[in-house]
Amino acid sequence: MPTKTPPSIIAIDGPAASGKSTLGLKLANELGYLFFDTGVMYRAVTWIALDHHIDIMNEKAVTALAENSPIDVVPASKSDGRGCDVLVAGRDITWETRLPEVDANVSVVSAYAGVRAALSQQQRRIGQRGEVVMVGRDIGTVVLPEADLKVYLDATAEERAKRRFDELTARGAKVDYDDILAKVSERDRIDSTRDIAPLKAADDAVVVDSNILNVDEVFERVLNLCK
């Protein structure tokens, strides 16, 4: 019998620090697909707003940034742990998008309807080319509801805060676990209750609990779904 062709469009959704990016990158590398973490676009807009001293609560101004800022996402040019390069007007801001101040504000930015409309259109265009693993919070529900395989990766807020704490301290940042947990919980609240594209599993998504599985076990389970 012929070997089954892997799904061409794979959507991986889930809350912050659930392991979506780690899973998505490993899966894309295994399949030879494009890895596209759509969250980097919202992070880029958030960083641009902060860098330009624009009030995050000014929806009109932030939306204008999303519509007019030249944001590009390309394959990683450095082996420093990044899954891609995030460029704004040619400037590499990949690690700037992971700063704590961006973490604290990105949910507000991503809740704006105009921002989501501007960025979702770009994400959809990339995804429809196929052979892509797209990671985000509304890929399977809004951006690419026709995705061939939808995975919702979940874990408790406590476990996800621990992962983010370990990630930041490994890079030399001085952070407090309780503070990170509070931010993760607040981000969950904002993401899951926003009016536009709230965080939730698609009806036909496979829910994977990464609380009880390590990175390799999660990867093997999802890879088996692809086969």
Image (cartoon, rainbow, N blue to C red):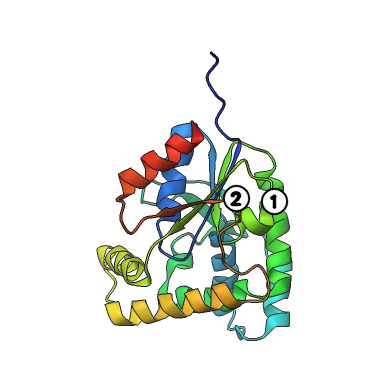
Q: Looking at this view, is 182 or 174 the one in front?
A: 182
Does 34 appear above or below 123? above
Q: Position of residue 195 (x, y in %)?
A: 67, 76
**CA neighbours of label 2 inside 10 A, class few (<14), some (14 to 19), many (20+):** few
Q: Looking at this view, is 218 or 32 the one in front?
A: 218
Name the residue beneath numbered marker 1.
124
Q: How many marks?
A: 2
Q: Is residue 98 left or right of residue 89?
A: left
Q: Is residue 211 visible?
A: yes
* Image quadrant where residue 71 sits: bottom right
Q: Is residue 140 left or right of residue 85?
A: right
- Looking at the rendered image, the disc whose residue lies closer to the viewer, 2 or 1, is 2
Does 67 appear above or below 128? below
Give the CA distance from mark 2 to mark 1. 19 Å
Q: Position of residue 45 (x, y in %)?
A: 60, 69
Q: Which residue is located at x 67 percent, y 50 percent?
A: 144
Name the residue beneath numbered marker 2.
204
Does 21 appear above or below 193? above
The mark that comes first in sequence, 2 or 1, is: 1
Q: Amino acid at mark 2?
A: Asp
Q: Amino acid at mark 1?
A: Arg
Q: Which element is circle 1 on?
A: helix
Q: Looking at this view, is 92 or 162 the one in front?
A: 162
Q: Position of residue 93 (x, y in %)?
A: 50, 62
Name, please, the residue furthest toward the front. 203
